[in-house]
Amino acid sequence: MKVTKYGIVALAVAIALLYGGCKNTAPSGPVAGLGGATVGKYVSIGNSLTAGYQSNGLFASGQAYSYPNLIAGQLLVAGSNVGTFQQPLYSDPGTPDPVTGKASRYELISWAGPVIGPRGLNPGSPVNLTLPRPYDNLGVPGAVIFDFLDSTDVSLKAQPPRSNPLFALILRSQAAFGKSIFQQAVALHPDLVTFWLGNNDVLGFATSGGVSPSSPTSTAIFTGLYTQALGTLHAALPNAKIVVANIPDVTAIPFFTTLGPKIKAEIPAGLVLQYQKHGTTGVADGTTNFTEANPPLICLTGSPYASLLGHPTGKWYRDHSYPALPAGIDTNQAFGFDPRNPWPDALVLDASEQATASASVQAFNSAIASVAAANHAAVVDINGFFNRIKLSGYQTSGISFTADYVSGGIFSFDGVHPSDQGAGIIANQYILAMNAAFGWSIPLVNVAALPALTVPLSKGSNVYPVIPDGAFSELNMLWGAR
């Protein structure tokens, strides 16, 4: 296959990072090294967070800064011989939207709003399909813990109900490579494996407002699958170093924390937001002025409808192809301020849904900790790390970061996935965990050397993005009904 100019640029950037751009510039500290260990192959396992997915798309210039690629670069600095870290690159501007066929990647379109979303560009194409072996980065956007051992042919995974062609892109229909993530990872005989699965087992529930799926993966099923996954991996690679990451609090990401404050500021005196609680399809059964102890969280998918509050409109139902209005709904009433035309359940994470998501994250992380210990795997406490960022921010390489949407610097335009610098911050958490667990001295990524968001919005501003409704179809594909 012809390698496009975008692929060449991304590869050049990646090579520059590997051999210089991300070296620790600190003047003192231990000499870089692996303590006598041999690391000839590094494989990463995960989902979109691992794949280098950001701003609602997979594209080569972003994949160059995936946290596994950054880790691989620092391993080279420490004296490993992992060589070129191979990824399933997709030339810029990236993967196609499953509905429009245009590139799904979000960009800042206009300061008026601001408007954030796809530019309507023709999509890119796969760059590295002819690699005669599995990829080193086996992060599959949309993957849940079940997918690690699932050997269903990848072409079937691109059909409903999953409808996710990225399985086929990354795993490829190559029987010689193996039909599961596990089989392809083991085929590479790695000395080091990073493993970060489980986020999507709760994230899909949360981002859909608790609608599709209507609940996270049950704790019993998750624990059983995680135990089987890590146990099988350790048994197949008894001498490999394995590093797993736990799951952050999904309700703390900008996808859930951005719109609520703006809506609160715009609610007229004497009114409250009328919304549907979990499982409700008709008249509102919840109200809020966002001053209670645990107010509902407004999903970023509500962006196209926030400006319609108070207007007689049924746009949300039309956009989602309802054949008829649900019983009790009257779109001639003031949207969001009348119980007969409430803010939809799919656009809000109410208090009970937040509790469900938080309970699942806690239970999943407890399982991850115990299963990791049983299989001699190191653990990266991503949950604790991001909780600290939420409370007091984070400083590294002379830069201050927060968990705020866009202006905080860590998250990309979709409010879920990390920016280039955010990926560097995550890579460093893995490196710190590996150094502590294995006695290594891998230098940290210099986050200041990584690109900041193309057009960062001013820090401290009340960012209120306007994202067209159709722009979320790519994310819906990743987190669709299981």
Image (cartoon, rainbow, N blue to C red):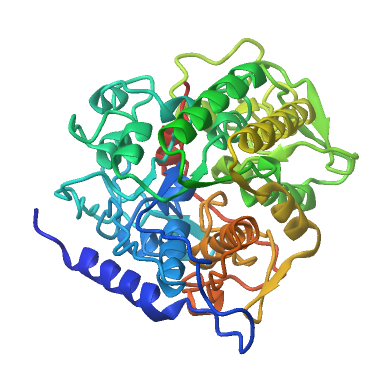
* 314 with respect to 188 (left or right): right
Which one is nearer the viewer's eye here, 149 or 466? 149
x%, y% of residue 217? 59, 22
Q: Residue at x 17, y 50 (%)?
A: 131
x%, y% of residue 166? 32, 38
* 139 with respect to 329 (left or right): left
Which one is nearer the viewer's eye here, 178 or 440? 440
Q: Could one spot residue 335 in this view of the protein?
A: no
Which one is nearer the viewer's eye here, 258 or 37? 37
Q: Residue at x 75, y 56 (%)?
A: 390
Number of marks in picture:
0
Where 56 sits versus 30, above or below?
above
Quadrant position of residue 429 = bottom right
Q: Residue at x 47, y 21 (%)?
A: 482
Which one is nearer the viewer's eye here, 430 or 409? 430
Quadrant position of residue 124 = bottom left
* 166 with respect to 391 (left or right): left
Quadrant position of residue 281 = top right
* 340 with respect to 288 (left or right): left
Where 235 sits versus 328, above or below?
below
Identify the residue at the far bottom of this view.
27
Q: Residue at x 61, y 62 (%)?
A: 439
Q: Could one spot residue 266 in this view of the protein?
A: yes
Where 421 sits versus 329, above or below?
below
Where 152 sits versus 30, above or below?
above
x%, y% of residue 152? 30, 20
Identify the residue at the far front of this view.
36
Identify the residue at the far top of this view.
327
